[in-house]
Image (cartoon, rainbow, N blue to C red):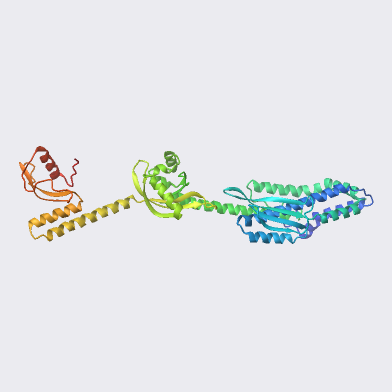
Amino acid sequence: MPSDRTPPERLAARSIVKRLTLALVATVCVVSLAAIAAAYTLVERAEKGGAEQRVSQTLAYLSGSLEAPLWAVDYDSVRTIGAALSNDEHVVALTIRNENGATLYAVEKAPPASGMLRSMRIYHDDVGGRRLVGEVAVSLSDEASKAASRRLVLSSLLMAVLTLVAVIGVAVVYVREALSQPIRGLNEMVAAVAAGDYEATATTLPYVEFKPFGRALAQMAGEVRDQMARVRAAETKYRGIFENAVDGIFQTSPDGRILGVNPAFAKGLGFDSVDDLLAHTGGSSASLYVDRRDRERLLAELMRAGSITAHEMQVRRKDGRAIWASVSARLVRDEHGKPILVEGFVSDVSARKQAEHERLANLRFFESMDRINLAIQGAADVEQLMGDVLQAVLEIFDCDRAFLLHPCDPDAAAWHVPMERTRPEYPGALAEGAEMPRDARMSANQRRMLAADGPVQFIA
């Protein structure tokens, strides 16, 4: 068997074209003196089949060429393609319509030939399914085929049968023998590539005419191999980013079904793994919201703006504890504008929220102490001092009344209120300066207040 290193002259000597030409010329010379009549109907049928095939090929070409511009509503390109094909002398009629039946391009050089007019619907396949985008109808002239048929019948009437018998004999005996090996080699290469062996080469093909096919197949296999390697490398890279990200990453459907989360998302909510989260939630994100209306508000904002950044809400951990989370997400739509998924990042901001709460509490404390200090410094006497301080306490705590109680001894026999401040709508309930007998309940409450480190709340 020859290899790619076989000298060019030897490859030329084994050209299958030359071998078939010599064999057919010898066969025709042997049988040229003997001829038989060829049935006109058979020749005409063969020519008609060829014409039908040309029509089908033309329709297939038009379908492939027009699919993209029809889908993109690029009617200028559609008309350009139609005009280019109309220049073909064999095309006698051509009509292109869109999916609504509106004619985008039409030409008719002559009445369509009988039996030669064919039409085809054009579809576009996408993630949403198969969609009709248009229709094309074409008619090819059959004059050339009829003329060829007449010439063929007239010139070959005497020799057709013997020539046909001889060619069939050569095809059966010689061509099968000559072509079986290269075809088998091509089949082996195709089978190897289909099985995932992308190292196939064209060295096993014995004829130079087949080697371009083998080399093209080997080149295609190499490109597929390289592309698959790049895809695997990219998948490994981005899978590593997804699996090892510090923040939680999620994908959900618009109706709340969990399509995918990374381990950080699951662990941030107290789950042992992603599988544990899916088993606990049943594959739905609804149970993760403390207030399920937050999800409705989040989805409404995504529908309006397309994305959100640092949106804070409370989510529920596996143990039932509520935490604060910051969500940044975007809404993904298909080519028709239909929402198909929500994807984004989640981070736990509970510590920051707690620190912010404590900061505000401390700030309020110091602001309140400053008001008390100003009230003390601005007083001209003890009476004004106590009154201004009580008024400040009333406003700081936003309460109904503030008063002083004396004495602070729980064992004293009586007590009185030397001063009180109230809101206008809540007049004083205690008589200022009047002695009040101290009962056991009052003594117990006062001991409780004296022993406490902070505020004491009494609920009536």
Horizontal relation, residue 436 to residue 364: left or right: left
Q: Percent from the top left, x then y, of residue 341? A: 49, 49
Q: Judge whether residue 215 can be spotted in this image.
A: no
Residue at the right extreme, as displayed: 33
Horizontal relation, residue 263 to residue 68: left or right: left
Asked whether 102 or 60 is in front, the reply is 102
Asked whether 412 or 168 is in front, the reply is 412
Q: Percent from the top left, x then y, of residue 404? A: 11, 49
Residue drawn at the location 76% of the way across and 51% of the way down: 53
Residue drawn at the location 79% of the way across and 60% of the way down: 9
Figure check: 116 above or below 9: above
Residue drawn at the location 11% of the way across and 54% of the way down: 386
Residue at the front extreme, as displayed: 425
Asked whether 214 or 357 is in front, the reply is 357
Q: Percent from the top left, x then y, of residue 135? A: 67, 52
Horizontal relation, residue 122 to residue 207: left or right: left
Q: Percent from the top left, x then y, of residue 80? A: 67, 61
Asked whether 173 or 139 is in front, the reply is 139
